[in-house]
Amino acid sequence: MPGVNDMNFHQLATIMNSITHQATGINTITPTNTAEFVSVGTTALTVGTDALFNTLTNMFGRTIMANRPYSRKFQGIEASQQRWGYINRKISISDRGFEDDNSYVLTEGGTCDPWQIKKASLIEEKFYGTNVYSDYLTIPTVQLRSAFTNPGDFAALLDLMTTNMQDRMEQATENGARAAIANMIAGVVTGGGTEQEVHLLTEYNAETGITPPLTAITVMQPDNFAPFMRWAYAKIATISDRMAERSTLYHTSLTNKPIMRHTPAEDQRLFMFSPALRKMDATVLSTTFNDNYLKQPYTEAVSFWQSIEVPDQIQVTPAYLAADGTITTAQEAVTVDNVFAFLCDRDALGITLFDESVLASPLNPRCRYYNVFYHRNTRWWNSFTENAVVFLLD
């Protein structure tokens, strides 16, 4: 089994640093092995400066702390431990065929056996493994005092340092969620059914007969964008309606055990590329009498899918569920361009926090400092037997 999909605790610092650098623009987009950490359901088991940091001047007039707490995005896909436990399993049932009504085929001297056994066709998926990562912060008690004129400023510095640490932990969890979505999208494109991948421009050009055919660039022109967006939202709404029907179209079913799924509207999650969404708010909704026609019950704007520098592209090596119930990892990185939207069941992907702690060491009596350690134990998970559809602007 690849990556995190086992019973072990997996150190995540290296890949988390890579994901964060891509998300924050430090590095450009890089093929990322999301299979290493996404749990996929499977049926297989001086006067110049201070002496410590060498960055803070000892003499100054007023200090302003650039301190702003950060709240992570994608909180809507978090699932509690009550819903998703430490070792998790999902039990589904496959439909079995109907039988003839024997009450209409009775014969003289015949029998009608009411005790024939017809067992339920059950499928069990297991979700294993969690990811662990930590960081720590050194809190000095005397070394920095010469850099401040009063205890309040010194306390504000400590608050700045701890808030920064918390912000980084928040963003790490957010970027893990972003990568879980990227893994799901790439997994659907690689191993999903044909109905799970919608090429919006291809279908729009064919349906409208527009000449010349629109491209991802020309569709953004004012005369083209509004009618296309109305059509695209109608397309998304149509698939949303169909998701509410029991079918096998929009998820991975197991060989010889088809899994029927339906996703009511209130359980659907739509993630939409925010440049298109904001442009729609400004140009389409302002001319639409009832904007509820262009709304989904749960919609989250995604400013970028993986890299803030290449916002509409995904480059990952995904893990996904094969039809035989085993986890499959792509042989090489999968690039998905022009990702426009992603519609899925609320149970198709998520985040579960199992343990989060902040612990302080004893004071070092010789150097008069102590360390504060931050730990987080998280699972990002995908379930490919739940409904999911990728919309591409191509």
Image (cartoon, helix red, strand yellow):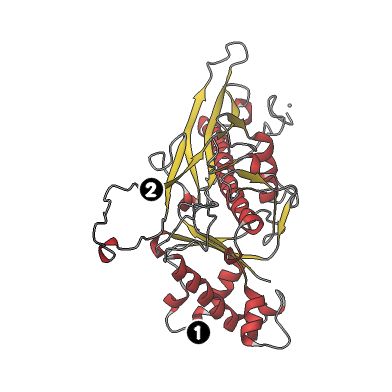
- Helix, strand or loop at mark 2: loop
Considering depth in this image, is 262 or 299 the residue closer to the camera?
262
The N terminus: image quadrant: top right
Dot 2 alpha-carbon crowd within 10 angstroms: few under 14, some 14 to 19, many 20 or more: few
Question: Residue 91: image x %, image y %?
Answer: 42, 45
Give above or below for 373 relative to 121.
above
**Which quadrant of the figure has residue 165?**
top right
Image disc number at residue 162: none
Question: Residue 176: image x %, image y %?
Answer: 59, 45
Q: How many marks?
A: 2
Looking at this view, name the residue that lies furthest to the front: 109
The C terminus: image quadrant: bottom right
Q: Nearer the viewer, mark 2 or mark 1?
A: 2
Which residue is at a point 62% across and 73% down the rendered structure image?
200
Give above or below for 388 relative to 235.
above
Question: Residue 177: image x %, image y %?
Answer: 56, 48
Q: Which residue is mark 1?
A: 287
> Tag 1: residue type?
Thr
Mark closest to the chain's N terminus, 2 or 1: 2
**Cα gap from disc 2 to disc 1, whole angstroms:** 53 Å
Which residue is at a point 54% across and 16% down the rendered structure image?
363
Which residue is at a point 73% across and 28% down the rendered structure image?
47
Considering depth in this image, is 196 or 160 the residue closer to the camera?
196
Say whether residue 377 is left or right of residue 187. Answer: left
Question: Residue 82: image x %, image y %?
Answer: 38, 40
> Tag 2: residue type?
Ala
Considering depth in this image, is 364 or 389 the residue closer to the camera?
389
Which residue is at a point 50% across and 84% down the rendered structure image?
287
Q: Which residue is mark 2?
A: 120
- Helix, strand or loop at mark 1: helix
Say whether residue 117 is left or right of residue 275. Answer: left
